[in-house]
Amino acid sequence: MPGKAQSRLPQSGFLLMILVIALAVGPTVKHQVPAALSVHETDEPLLPSDPPVIRHDVYDLKVRLTQLGFYSGPLDETYDVEAVKAVRAFQESYWLEPNGIVDQTTWKALAVGVSRPAHTSSKPLPEEGELYLEVDTELAELRVWVGDTLWKTYPVAVGKWSTLTPVGEWKIVDKGYESGGAFGTRWMALDVPWGGYGIHGTNRPWSIGTYASLGCVRMFNEDIEELYELVPIGTRVIITGYRPPLDFGKPFGPGTIGPEVVRLQEALREFGFDAGPADGRYGPLTEQAVQEVREVFGLGRDGWASRDLFVLLQVEGQ
Amino acid sequence: MRSEVAAAMVLVVAVLLCGCKTQTPLPYEVPPGDIKIVAWDAKEPHLPGAPPYSELATLVAEDYAKTLGITVDLEFKPRQQIEDLLLGDYQGEIPSVVFSTEWPFVGIGTQDLTEMVEADDYLEAAAGFWMYDGRLMGIPAYVHWLCLAKRADLGNSSPNAGYFIYSPGFLHSALDYGNLDWVPEDICTYVEWVKQTYGLCQEPVLDLWEQGRIGMMYPVTPHLFKWIRLSEKDLDTEMLPIDNPEGTPRFYFSVPGYVVMDGNEQTMKYAVELAKLLAANRGRWAARAIGCIPAYVSDTPLFDLESGFDRDERLKLMSSFLQSQARITDWVTYSRKTHVRLGVNRAIEEYLSGSVSREQFEQRIYDALKSHTNQ
C-alpha cells in the first residue's frame, strides 16, 4: 500500500507542474492578429523623420502629450517637429532616453496615471439567456447583455468621424492574446465583410471614452481580459450609432456587401420582413425579403433593391 | 347510513352536472384525438397605427389550438413559396390551410368548401369571387384593389403618370376584364396606348412622385396607397380607377382568402374552422391597416369606421367592387398569364423606355409568347 502511494506522488507532481506552466504561459501565448485586423494598429516604433511620418497613432500621441502639458499644436496624424520635441521633453521628464522614438516603453510611460473607472455593475452573470454584446458608438459604451438583462457596461473608444466603427450585427469569428502593444492583451475579430474590425485592448488607455480608433473598439486591458473569458467565438455583437454617408443612388442586389446593405436589412426588418441579421451581406434572406416587400407594394417581384424600394423604405436620412 | 351517503353523492354529482351545463359551450366540437394542423400564412408590412399582422394571426391560431386542445402550427412563408405550393411545385409536407396571397387562383389540391362554409356570412361578391364551377374553393378574407393615384395638389400641371411595368397589375388591370385579352395584338395595343397616354417610362416612380415631377402613378396597391397617405404631408392624393385603351376606367379587384388543402375526413373540419378565423382576422387587419373591404359581412362596419377613407372613397370602392364581376381563375389560366407576363415584361420595358422601335417591340412580344405559351 505505501509503495502504491509513493508511486503516485511523482505523477501528481508532474501534472501539477504542467498545470502551473500552462497557467503561466497560457495568457502570453500569441495567436496572431488576423491580417485584416492588423492593418488598423501597429507596434512598430514611431521614428522622427523628414518628411514626417503620418500615422494614425500620432493622433493618440498628440492627445496624450496635450493632456500632460507637453504639446499645444494641432491634433492630427503627422509626427512633425513639434511633436518630436514634445516627445523628447516627455521622455526626459520620465528618465527615458530623449530620442523622440515612440516605442513600447514610451507608450507605457504615457499611460501612467490613466485609471480605469469603476464598473457600473458587479452583479453575477445571469445563467439563462443568450449572451451578446452591444456597442453604442454615440456613448462609447460596450454593454454585455444576457437575454433581456443588461449585465455590465464598459467604456470603450470607437472610430473617429473619418473612420467610423461599422454599424451592424456581427459575430466574433476569432480571438487571441497579445503582449500588451497596440492591441493590448486580448483581441476578438468581427466578421465585418468590408474590412478588418475587432474589439481589443490598447496601450493608449487615455483614448477610452472618445472617438479615436480606425473603427475598432478599444477597451482597457483589464476589461478586455474579463470580457474575453466570457465571450466565445460566435457571440453576436450589435453595433449601433453613427454611420458614414450612405449611397442609395444606384440599385444593388444579391452578392452586394456594404453599409448600405446593413441599412437596407434594418429597414426591411422595421417594415416587418425578416432579412436575417443586419450583417451587410445581400444573401438569400435579404433577397427574399426584398421580393416580398416589392410584391406587396406592387413594385414587381424581383430581388433587387432599387431606388423605388429605397424611397419606400425611407432608408436615407437615418 | 349507506343510503344517506349514496344520496349525498348523487346530489353532489347532480350539482356538478348542473354546474357544467351553465358553462358556455365550446364553439367547436372537441376533436377525438391528437390533431395537428399546419397553416401557411404570409407576412404583412408594419405600418404606423396598425397592429403587427403576424402577432394577431399567431394569437388567433394559439387561441384556437388552446380552445380545442389541438396543435396548430402557423408558419409565415414567402409569397413565392405559397404560389409554388398552389401550383404543385412544392416538395414537402402539404399544409392544411394556406393564405392565397394577393393574386389568388384555385390551386392544385384546393378543397371544395361548399358544404362546410356558409357563403352568406361573406359579402356576396367576395364569396362569388371564390366560386369556381359552382363550388366554393376558398374562404374570402378581404377585397384587394388596385387604383391610379393622383396628386390633386398639382392640379393638371403634371399630367404625366409613372407606371410600374413589373407589377403584375400592370397587365392584369388592362387584360383581365373588358375586351382585351392576353394575346400579342392586345398586349401591343395596350402598351402603345400607355406610351401615347402617359409618355415614356420614367423611373424611379416613387422618387418622381415625391418630387412632384409626375402627378399620377399606377397600379397602386392598398399598401402603397396607405404608404402615400402616411408619408405625404400636405399632398391631397386621390384614388382613381385605372384607365385603359377602351376608355372604361376601372379599379382592379381580387379577393385574397384562405384555401384548405386537407381533405382528411377526420381533420378537415378543424382546418376549415381555423381558415375561417384566419380569414376574418386578416380581413379586419386589412380594413384597419390598408383600407380594404373585409369579406366577412359582420366586419363591414370596420371598413366604414377604420379604413381612413371618406364616405365618397368608400362608396367608390364598394360599388365598383360589387359591379366588377371579378372571378377567380384556375391554376392553368393563372400559370399561363404569369408566363405571358414574365415573357413580355422586358420587351415592354425596352419599348416604353424608348430603346426599341414599334416593329422591334411587336416582334419581341410575338417571340416571347411563342417561347412561353402555345399562342
Image: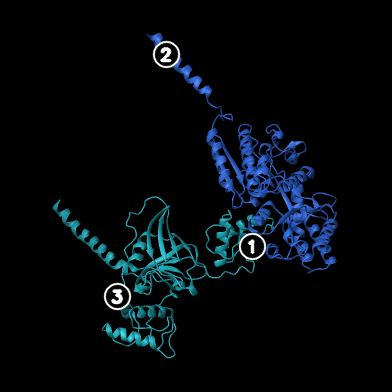
Chain colours: A cyan, B blue
Judge if badges 2 and 1 mark residues of a common chain.
Answer: no
- Front residue (pair B306, B109): B306
Q: Residues within 10 Å of mark 2 (few under 14, many from 20)?
A: few
Image quarter hosting the C terminus of chain B: bottom right
Residue A86 picture quarter: bottom left
Number of the label disc, if any, that sits on residue B286 = none
Residue that numbered label 3 is attached to:
A112
- As displayed, is residue A114 above or below residue A284? below
Residue B359 position, x and y percent, is 85, 66
Q: Residues within 10 Å of mark 1 (few under 14, many from 20)?
A: some
Q: Is residue B125 left or right of residue B76?
A: right
Q: Is residue B158 visible?
A: yes
Q: Secondary structure at mark 3?
A: loop
What residue is drawn where x is 40% and y is 10%? B4
Number of the label disc, if any, that sits on residue B8 = 2
C-alpha span from label 1 to label 3: 52 Å
Q: Residues within 10 Å of mark 3 (few under 14, many from 20)?
A: few
What residue is drawn where x is 44% and y is 90%? A51
Residue A7 position, x and y percent, is 18, 57
| Amino acid on which disc 1 is placed | Val
Residue that numbered label 1 is attached to:
A311
Does the CB distance between marks 1 and 3 fall below 8 Å? no
Chain letter of disc 3 in the image: A
| Amino acid on which disc 3 is placed | Val
Residue A181 position, x and y percent, is 35, 75
Q: Secondary structure at mark 2?
A: helix
